[in-house]
Amino acid sequence: MTAHFASITLRPFTLEDISAFTAAVNNSLDTLLPWMVWAHENYEEKEAASWINFTHLQRATGEAHEFAIVDEQDRLLGGAGIRFSRFRGDFSAMGYWVRSDVQGKGIASQAVNQLLKFGFERPAIKTIEILAAEANTASRRVAEKCGGRFVDYRYGLIILDSGPVNTAIYHFHRPQK
Ligand SMILES: CC(C)(COP(=O)(O)OP(=O)(O)OC[C@H]1O[C@@H](n2cnc3c(N)ncnc32)[C@H](O)[C@@H]1OP(=O)(O)O)[C@@H](O)C(=O)NCCC(=O)NCCS
């Protein structure tokens, strides 16, 4: 039986996460490289620092809330975030990644469920979106497991290193009270 993570916490990144973040990326390239354009071999601490500082800026401007996913001992398991819609007709959107060595234990699904609660605390948000490359079965399964409704495929919403790809769109609607 696969061990399930009893509980994860989403908290803002701090500069103390730099070395754990860098190690997590470099040790997860097998699963990150196909889908995350920011990931690359020999990812460096200065890149982690710059990303973490950027997440603080995004939080301050209200553009997005990016979180470290950590376990009960505050060990970094991955990252997850919600980017708020900026224009009428846009949707707020979630993104996530999990360290390769702890994938398949329900971590991303827990993170998405927590982000959904967090996002729908804002009355203006009626719909939250996940976009996943058509071939990214793990990410699509997370969207489905968390109750996302498959809307359609659209070509080019995600651009990978190889170029634009067919993109699966999932929507989550504000739960009815
Ligand atoms: C997508 C990702 C975040 C999932 O993280 P995770 O913690 O392993 O997710 P969960 O354990 O909550 O759920 C994963 C589900 O996908 C399934 N899955 C994993 N790999 C799969 C594959 N190749 N084909 C089909 N299903 C797959 C798992 O079995 C599980 O479903 P189940 O609970 O029904 O068995 C992780 O694989 C990752 O970081 N990938 C690289 C980054 C990425 O793609 N991010 C998303 C960009 S849209």
Image (tube, helix red, strand yellow):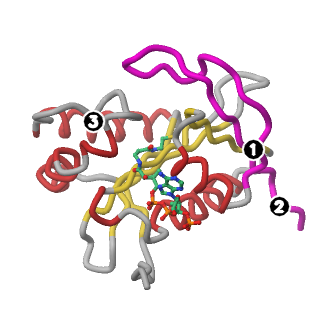
Q: Residue at x 80, y 54 (%)?
A: 174
Q: Viewer-proximal residue, 101 or 111?
A: 101
Q: Quadrant of the N terminus?
A: bottom left
Q: Position of residue 136 (x, y in %)?
A: 52, 41
Query: Is residue 146 depicted above or below 148 in this figure?
Result: below
Number of on-image labels: 3
Name the residue at the right extreme. Answer: 176
What is the spatial separation of the Cα atoms under label 3 and label 2, in whole angstroms? 32 Å
* Secondary structure state at the residue bearing disc 2: loop
Circle 2 residue: 175
Say if the magenta span includes residue 152: yes
Label 1 CA crowd tier, 10 Å (few <14, some 14–19, many 20+): many
- Residue 39, quarter of picture: top left
Give the label on residue 51, or none: 3
* Secondary structure state at the residue bearing disc 1: strand
Left/right placement of residue 125 relative to residue 12 reads right
* Secondary structure state at the residue bearing disc 3: helix
What type is the residue that disc 3 sits on? Trp
**Which numbered mark, 1 or 3, is in the foreground of this view?**
1
Left/right placement of residue 18 relative to residue 88 reads left
Q: Please report the bounds of the magenta region as a residue range.
A: 148-177
Label 2 CA crowd tier, 10 Å (few <14, some 14–19, many 20+): few
What type is the residue that disc 2 sits on? Pro
Q: Position of residue 87 (x, y in %)?
A: 70, 22
Say if the magenta span includes residue 151: yes
Q: Earlier in the sequence, mark 3 or mark 2?
A: 3
Circle 1 residue: 171
Q: Position of residue 126 (x, y in %)?
A: 80, 45
Instruction: Characterize the magenta stretch by its predominant secondary structure.
Output: strand
What type is the residue that disc 1 sits on? His
Q: Residue at x 32, y 80 (%)?
A: 72
Label 3 CA crowd tier, 10 Å (few <14, some 14–19, many 20+): some
